[in-house]
Image (cartoon, rainbow, N blue to C red):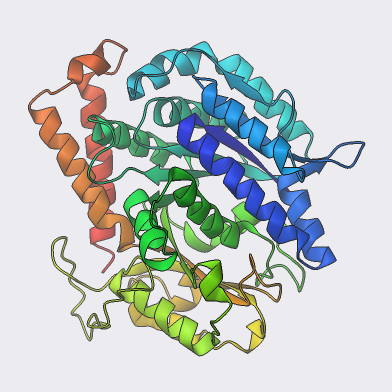
Amino acid sequence: MSVVTVQLGQCGNQVGPELFDMICSDAAGGQELYSRGSWERFFRRTAHGDLVARAVLVDMEPKVINQSLTRAAKSGRWRYGEASHFSQKQGSGNNWANGFCVHGPHHREVVEELVRQEVERCDRLAGLMAMMSVAGGTGSGVGTYVTQCLRDIYPKSFILNHLTWPYGTGEVIVQNYNSVLTLAHLYQLSDAIVVHENDTVHRICSKLLNIKHISFRDVNRVIAHQLGSVLQPALTAYSGGTHSRNPLGDLVSALACHPEYKLLSICTIPQMSSASMDYSTFSWPGLLKHLRQMLISNSKMEEGIDWQVRLPSGSDRTRSLTGPSFNTSLANLLILRGKDVFSADIGGFLDPTLYTSWLPSEEAFSSWKSEVPFNKYEKSATLVSNSQALLRPLDNMVGKAWNMFASRAYLHQYVKFGISEEDFLDSFTSLEQVISSYSQLG
């Protein structure tokens, strides 16, 4: 089954080609069955045997799309479809309302047609993955509008939204407004929302990959690596000894079992520079011990794990939004790839104390495995978690947006494009409910 990716805005159209590049490279080095399954999932073949990404590229400015098309063609391994992209010459001005209320509706038909054509090229559709930022105008505003259209057209298909969270120090003055409006709307539309925080990925580039001058491409490669570790073929409990046929459906089934809880975060270990990889060896007990503690302490990467955070005992499962505390999960998916993968003891992730009390751990935990090494790592482990990991950044973002709203800062910029104060209040109410739900997981 195949996944159709919709790349939206500058961010989506920069992360997308990194993901396809990584998938193509990883598949080329895998076993025949693994490679064939990966290519079928993300690419289609032309009559001449060329690999073409199952993707639609959308932006209100042409620059980034043109760069992505050129880069893909120059790779010599894959490319985008010749008529699978749409752009204009005027952006959304970092304004969610401009993207959602103006550009989205104005260009709805042409974008829907591009997606329809790509869907019809699939023998069987696994679902749609929309890649976008939450901070800007096109990615967030047009991206939300396009997701709404896709939900109307494909009501029974899985829709996964991949969101890039802005730097906390601020990229856009109204990024918290845009983020609130995006998340509140997507919560009604998406089956699951995978979030990557730029601050976290930046630290991975600096601390783990030892990159001195970090570029957006470096950040996007880390995101692509983590996403690919989830989306590449693997054996699941339901696949009957063969690779999973529907990565999006299996992901949603494993992790998004309740409509109040849709936010997913990803941790992957090891992550290191290629120079360090040559001198490193890893064992499954060591990797899983570190990954489990990362989950418990909500450590975003392997370096700097807080080993002081322990599992709670008895009824001591309180949650603090300010101090260090135990990270309670609704559901976790552990994905192991590489040598001796079936010998790994994953029992530590079945501990009921890791999970909310109202869902049995055997229902809350899932594992996928593949003997094929991923992206040159002999052994690697990825944890996709529906937990309180994103609670604090979400609460901070809503708080900052509310402070701006209370002083009516920049509201006229949204009102003039059709977003009312009531729309803002509805969005705040929606996300306050999400914050409350995740706070009560413990």
Position of residue 107 measured from the top left corner of the image (x, y, whole percent): 54, 14
Q: Is residue 4 above or below residue 195?
A: above
Q: Is residue 355 visible?
A: no
Q: Is residue 191 above or below residue 273?
A: above
Asked if residue 360 lies left or right of residue 72, the reply is left
Q: Quadrant of residue 245?
A: bottom right
Judging depth in this view, the residue of 63 and 56 nearest the camera is: 63
Judging depth in this view, the residue of 15 and 34 nearest the camera is: 15
Q: Is residue 403 visible?
A: yes
Q: Quadrant of residue 173?
A: top left
Asked if residue 402 lies left or right of residue 194, the reply is left
Judging depth in this view, the residue of 370 and 431 nearest the camera is: 370
Position of residue 391 measured from the top left corner of the image (x, y, whole percent): 27, 56
Position of residue 392 measured from the top left corner of the image (x, y, whole percent): 23, 56
The residue at the point 64 percent across, 24 percent down is 85
Asked if residue 193 lies left or right of residue 373, the reply is left
The residue at the point 47 percent across, 87 percent down is 286
Q: Residue furthest right?
A: 47
Asked if residue 46 lies left or right of residue 255, the reply is right
Q: Quadrant of the C terminus?
A: bottom left
Q: Residue furthest left?
A: 407
**How many numbered tags mark residues here?**
0
The residue at the point 47 percent across, 82 percent down is 288
Q: Is residue 42 above or below residue 373?
A: above
Position of residue 427 measured from the top left corner of the image (x, y, whole percent): 27, 34
The residue at the point 70 percent across, 56 percent down is 25
